[in-house]
Every structure is written in C-alpha cells, then in structure tokens.
Image (spheres, rainbow, N blue to C red):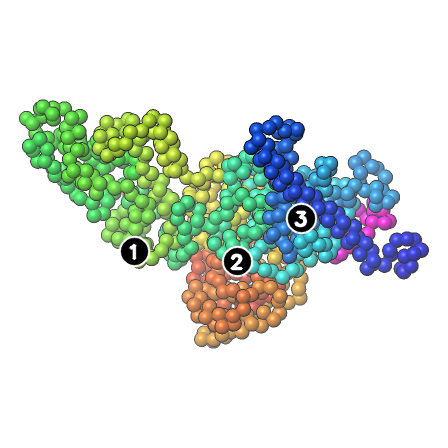
Amino acid sequence: MDHSPESTGLPTDLESVERAELAVEQAHVDRVYGRVEEAARSAARIAVDGHQRGQAQQVGMVRDEEMTGLYERDVLVFAAARRIAELDAEHEGLVFGRLDSDRPGADEPATTANELETLYVGRIGVRDAEYEPLVIDWRAPAAEPFYRATSADRLGVVRRRVLRCRGAKIIGLEDDLLAPERAPEDLPVMGEGALMAALSRARGHTMRDIVATIQAEQDKAIRAPARGVTVIGGGPGTGKTVVALHRAAYLLYSDRRRFERGGVLVIGPSAAFMAYIERVLPSLGENTVSLRAMGEVVDGVSATAVDDVEVARIKGSLRIRQVLSRAARDRVPGAPTSLKIFVGGASVELDANALDNVRRNALRRTQRNKAVTEARRGLVNALWQRFPEDLKSGKLADRESFGDAVTDLPAFASFFFAWWPTLMPVQVLRWLGDARRLRHWARGEFNDAEVGLLAEAIGTATELTVADIALLDELDQLLGRPLPVERDEEFDWLEGLSDGVNEVLTSSERRARAIAAAEAEEVAEYAHVLVDEAQDLSPMQWRMVTRRGPQASWTIVGDPAQSAWHDPAEATAAMDSMLSHLQRHTFRLSTNYRNSAEIYAFAGEVIRREIPDADLPNAVRETGVEPEHRQVEVGQVADAAAAAATELLGLVEGTVGVIVPPRLRAEVGKVLAEIGNPRVAALSPLESKGLEYDAVVVVEPDAIVTDTLGGIRALYVVLTRATQRMITINSTTNWLP
Ligand SMILES: Nc1ncnc2c1ncn2[C@@H]1O[C@H](COP(=O)(O)OP(=O)(O)OP(=O)(O)O)[C@@H](O)[C@H]1O
C-alpha cells in the first residue's frame, strides 16, 4: 500500500481514509442539525410575528397560507427532531444512512464517486432553505432501496452506508458494496457490516429502533398497504415486534390524515413489555400512537394480576359468554322480590314471578341499563292489571293517569331504584363469586369443578386480573350504558314525569347533552389496530380487541409455537371468526436476530420434540458459547440461580434476566435482591414474553412447563430470550431433549 499521500493528494492508508470519510459525513450531519436549529428559530419568529400581526389586526406582507405552510413545516421538523435528540442523546442520531446510486439513465459505470447520486436517509425528512432535501424520511418511497437493495437486485444502488452516530456525532461507518464492478476507484468501503454490529450490541432495559438496519423481508411487511388484515408471522427474535412498531410509524407517514385522526392502537402482552417497547416510536419521531397492555385495553379499568392456569382457561373460553349473559339478565342479588303499593285506596302487589316476567319482557329487545323505561312501563302495566276494576275511575280512570299516580309514589321510586339499579360490569362479574348462583348460570357450560374454581377465584379476588378485563368488556356490551335522560324524556311520558329533572333546558342544550352522553358511552375506536404476541389472546380477548376497531385495518403479529394459551387452535379460530370478513395478507420473517445460533439450536430442539412442525427461523450469529445446564438439589435452586446470575454479570455487559416459575418467584427474588445489581431482573415466564436479555438464567424448566397454561410453549419462550448466554438450573430434567 502506498503510504505517501502527498504523491496523489489523497489519503491512502485505511485510518486516514476513514478519518476523511468521517469528516465528510460529519459535515453533512452538521448541516442537517444546523438546518433543524434554523427551522426552530424561524418557527419561533413566525409564531411571534403572527401573534403580533393578529393583535394589531394588520395584513402582513406574506400570504397567510404561505406563512402557515412554512410555519407548520418548520415547527413539525423541529418538534420531531428535538424529541428524537432528547431520546437518543447517547445513541443513534437523526441521520443514519446514505445511498450512492447510479444516476438515472446512466448505462456506463461512474468513473468517479462524484458522478454517483447521493441520498441521505434519516428518521425524519429535513430540507434546506431552498427546499432541497438534506435527508429523506426512512418511510419515503425514495428510501426503499436503502432496505430492499441486494447484490442480486440492487435497485441502482452501488454502495449502501450506515452512519453510526451518538447524538449528532458520527462514531463509525459500515458499508455494503452492492455492485463492486460498478464502483468507482475512489469510492471507499468501510466497516464490517452494520447488522452484525447492531446484533452483537449489549442489551439495555428498553428496545431500540432498527431503522438503520431493517432487512428486506422486514421492510416488505413494514410497508405493506394498510388494508384488511396484515399477518406477520415468524419464530422468536425475527423482529416481529420491532417490525410492527416500524409499521405503525410507516402508516402514520403514508396516510397521516387517516391514521392520526382515527388513531393507531398497539396492543402487547404486559405492562413490562409496553415499558420495554415504549421508546421505539418516539425515537422514530412519532408519539401519537396509543400503546396498551392487554390488561389496559378497556378505558377506565386496568389489571396486571394474572389468574392461575385453570382459572385463566375458564375465563378465556367462549363458553363463559353464556354465563355472563345469563347473569346480566338475572335478578339483582339482594333486590326486593315483591312490590306492594297503596294506590287509590287499594293495595296492589306483584310477587317474585310477576316481577320476573316484567324483567324478562323489558330485556327482550333492550340491554339492561338501557331498558329503564321498558321496566318501569312493565311494572305499571302489571300493577294496572291487578288494580281493582271498580276503582278505575276519576283520576285513575285510565292506565296513563294510573301510571302518573304510581310513579309519583315515593314507595314506588325507592322500590324501582333497588330493583332496577344501573349495573356496573364489575358488579355483575363479582356475582360470579357466589358458587350457588354461578352453578345456575353455568348450567350446560361448565362442570362442577370449573364452577368451583371460578367462584373461588372471583369470590376471593382482591384485584382484577388481566383475563377479567375481557369479561368486563363483554358485560359492558351485555348491560349497555344508561341512555341520557333527555333522550328518554323525548319519547316517553312516564320517564319524563318521574326522573326528577326540573331544570329548564333549551332544545339545543338538550341536544348537546344527549350527544355528549352518547359519545361518553362509545367504545374508543381506532383506524388501525396492531396486536403483538397475538398467539396469546384467548377467544374472549379477541372479542374485546376487535371491538376497538370495527372499521379498522389490522396488523397481527405472532408465533403459535410461543402461545401462552393452552389451545392455540381455539385462539386462532376465535381470531378468524372475528376478522374473517377482511382480506388477509401474510408475511413470514425467517431470521432470528436475537439468539446466538448455539442458544437457538437448543431451544429449537426442545420445541420440535413437542411440536414437530413449529416454524423455526435461522439464527445467524455464532458466539461459540453453548448453553449450560446445571443440576442441583431441590433446596439449592435459589442459591444456584443467584450464583449463575452473578457469574453472568461478569461475562456480559448488559442485562441478565432470571426467569422463574411462579412458585419459586418469591424465594429467588429474595436472593437476587441481595445481589443488588440493577442489571439483573427476576421475572415470570409470562412476563418474559417479548423481552430479551444479554444473558438468561432459566430456573426449573420442568416447573415452567407444568405451572403455565402454555406448557412447553412457555418454556420455548423462556429459552429464546437470551442474546449471548444461557444457564438453566434444574432439580429435574424431564424437559431436556
Ligand atoms: N433488522 C434488524 N436490525 C437490527 N436488529 C434487529 C433487526 N431485526 C430484529 N432485530 C433485533 O432482534 C431482536 C428481536 O426482535 P423482536 O423482539 O422484534 O423479535 P420478535 O419476533 O418479536 O421476537 P419474539 O417473538 O421472540 O418476541 C430485537 O433486539 C430487535 O431489535
């Protein structure tokens, strides 16, 4: 190699080439940041100016729409850039990619690098003062070749470059030469591959975006049109979650009007998972997406507790619908079972049977909380029938005036209040805690043992569980929400007289109130719903989730081999039945980017033994470190787990997850707390869903299989959480392949 740069005027040794390249890229990145600052200043100036003009009632020199356009663009760019900069102060910056491509129409290879067309790709688009793009948004069509180009189909790209930045500073370059035969002599190629660098990086407590290294098959799923249902499948670590999040950002970019207004909802398995992924979208410049854990899907209630295996199975099964429906229509426990009133000199009585008849009639076409009018009218009718004929005269000559008289009676009002209260879903759910009543409602659906388990679980519960939320949503549908008083009043004479509303309202106030009440009653609906770890949804949860998007398009992400549900086919059937009317597009991701090849080979063997046709991806990154299995006495498990965790802390830079079956959680948690290192976390198999750690200690795999609803599939999830090292601690070894 020629070490005399003076001879050609060009640096030729690798280090100085790299320095020169870094300087060129840094200059461009500095321009981008400079432009963002400028945008901020001009936005602030125009805002002040606009404000002053508004106050002085003057007509400005700049046309208003022009002003607004500039102002909005600058404000948007600035706001997005600042958000990204705050989040990523120590990590990737605004600009992360560069493409050098043949100029359009150029047949001959370029002879110098200058002849190639250069394009920078970043998290958001930024233009210079002349409106020329300094960097284009990664979601723009022009950025597609950055993700899709391969040597076989290079889409005009000669060199793809990833800029590794820390904040605004470039710390490294990784190049991919897609067409060596078309590369000009002076086009340098740096680095050893951005993907491998990204994959080998130590893991922190939160997931990071992958904009700089999205792979072609992932890009196709990210940019798939938002129609019907997009299903993204693939084994552990194939990027399903991260792809789904990038897809949410892409949808907002491609049709902001539709998706920002209608809303994008991302549903994941647990609060821990949501905390893990919550920074990805803001780091892509988006913060309008609603992220919710499965226990938070329904407005106004939330749960993190989980049920025991058997109880979860009962609560998730479609058979419980009938039980809830019966409960929602039955007598209110503790409500009066007869009504006796004195009217017009007679005592008129309705017994339990008569009351039951009125109730059933009222519920024939209307949900309980909406059937107030029907119930009251039914009572009046039944009383009228029993009112002695010879007294039907004067003020009580017809049913209508009889109704007025009856509903005015305090005794009637207090009876009605107790007999037909507005029912809250959670109240009705609690009724299932009474085994006697539950047995009655569950006839033909659940056997005695199931009734006993469910009644015990609900009767002794001190908090709601995640599975309860779907039941509450179902009950909300069954019970309905009370109609606004004004609406009732308009069509019913009885209601109007008895509801005690004596304010004077204008008709527009009345209408506004009715609309507000009707809105308050609506379930929040979204334009696009993205369900992660979809294989875990119980049939009842599918019903809850699909209510969030009756008009929505869907992205459904999952892997049946990781199902936490005991019968994955039942859950799939439930999904199919809820979404079968929509067109479906399926994508499969085939590479496991998380696990080392050694760890995944082992996990694959475990799952294949039980599920021979499980969809196993390829794990590409070899570390040379095999997973280790330690056998210990039953009483030694917790200490052995702590020892393994301590050892692993010394071997990896990032996080260590200790995954423990629920029965050992407290014991292991205690010994781990003594280690007192924030890099170590203890978690249950369910909590480990979707998460990843540099190193993982798996405690008592056999107990993970027996104590979870997912069984072997839950163990497979646990065995696929580690990026670099894994140790299992066993007092039994039935699970070992
Ligand atoms: N193109 C990529 N570039 C860099 N990292 C990637 C890429 N694709 C995936 N990853 C990384 O691989 C890991 C696994 O991704 P992710 O959690 O999305 O997988 P998953 O398919 O949802 O896994 P699981 O089903 O096991 O929960 C993450 O750390 C993610 O950032």
Q: Amino acid at mark 2?
A: Val
The residue beneath circle 1 is: 459
**What is the x, y in percent for residue 587?**
59, 44
Instruction: Give left or right: position of 609 versus 463.
Output: right
Quick one: SS at disc 3?
loop
- Residue at image location 27% in from the left, 47% down from the top: 441
Q: Amino acid at mark 3?
A: Leu
The residue beneath circle 2 is: 717
- To which quarter of the image does residue 2 belong? bottom right
Mark 1 residue crowding within 10 angstroms, few (<14) / some (14–19) / many (20+): some
Mark nearer the viewer, 3 or 2: 3
84 or 62, which is in the foreground?
A: 62
46 or 666, which is in the foreground?
A: 46
Mark 3 residue crowding within 10 angstroms, few (<14) / some (14–19) / many (20+): many
**Reading the chain from its start, which is encountered first: label 2 or label 1?**
1
Marks 1 and 3, how far apart in space?
54 Å
643 or 599, which is in the foreground?
A: 643
Decide: is 543 above or below 563: above
**What is the x, y in percent for residue 572?**
47, 46
Which portion, as a residue range, is magenta?
174-193
The residue beneath circle 3 is: 94
**Reading the chain from its start, which is encountered first: label 3 or label 2?**
3
Which quarter of the image is occupied by the C terminus? bottom right
**What is the x, y in percent for residue 31?**
73, 46
Marks 2 and 1, how far apart in space?
32 Å
